Amino acid sequence: MHSANATLPIDASDEEISEILSAETDDYTASLVSGYQCLVLGIRRALAEDTLYDDMMLGMSNALEKEIRVQLQRCGSVYTSDQSTQLHAIWRVDQALDTDRSALFQSWMDTMQKKFIDSDTGLLHSMISIDPDRIDSPARATSVAWSIIFLEDIFPEFAKQQYHALRKDRVCRVASLAAIAEFPQLNIIDFGDMDSGPMLMGISPAATGFTLYPHKRYGTQMDYTRAYRIFELFGLPKIDETGKYYRMGNGMGDAILLYSKLTQPF
């Protein structure tokens, strides 16, 4: 990770930030953390419309591209949802700096389509290895839903297809509610893990929350409403002077719910 991330004061001016960044080495490494950092900087660039972090963004995206190309040749137990996030970060840099990584995007998609799409459901497998090729985890709903959000801008038709496959295979409906099962088979004694979060009888609140965006984007208002009721009923919503939040969730969960409210359907 670039050392500037540890030395930038939170209240530094643009001039101070530029001075600090210019004194740093261009030693960028690719990781899940740097992927999110590059993503955040890309979003900031689109909103602030300045060039303050352009060099950092370019260095990060170059490192991410190199790492993904290596992974497409040989890797062990890599999450495709992590790659989706990194690809979106690179796409953000392309949009900001007028670079072109379309060949990388197509190479990734060709590999996934050829080797790592479940033949029965059409869903993208969640954890993979290459050379030797191996599926380390079947399609987990949290991973698929997360990938849909970040791949939409790069592969709109693929993202839409993944949503409809996920909806067909994993949506569980009870009365006026709809939730998402994490795995193909329900397991009532599986209470979740670090990746899926807590689960109840195979139902994943995290996957249900991540799917709210594609429900709104590709589905129907009824799909969205049925799923959102889960959080209204069981998320312990609270409204105070800071706004509305859900006490059973966290900041990321609130952000995902807000993002789903802001998106517009096709």
Image: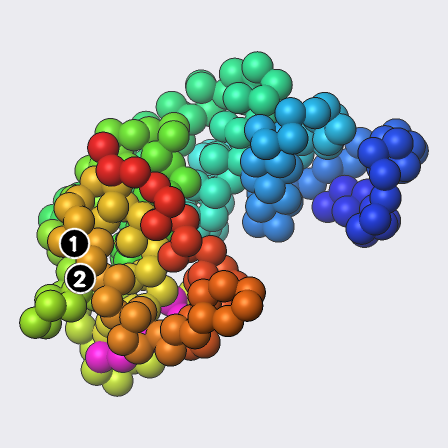
Q: Is residue 115 magenta?
A: no
At horizontal 34% and vertical 41% (from top left) the residue drawn is 263
Residue under numbered circle 2: 226
Tell me which segment is drawn in magenta. 196-201
The residue closer to the viewer here, 253 or 82, is 253
Q: Residues within 10 Å of mark 1 (few under 14, many from 20)?
A: many
**Which residue shows up at 73% across the image and 46% down it?**
1
Instruction: Examine the image and state in which quarter residue 149 appears.
Output: top left
Q: What x and y, as percent, mark residue 29? A: 69, 41
User: Colour scheme of this structure image?
Assistant: rainbow
Residue at the farthest front position = 241
Q: Secondary structure at mark 2?
A: helix
Point out which mark residue 62 bears.
none
- The kind of residue on which mark 1 rests is Asp
Q: Is residue 200 magenta?
A: yes
Q: Residues within 10 Å of mark 2 (few under 14, many from 20)?
A: some
What residue would you read off at disc 1? 223
| Left or right position of 119 against 40 | left
Determine the main secondary structure of the stretch shown in magenta: loop
* Helix, strand or loop at mark 1: helix
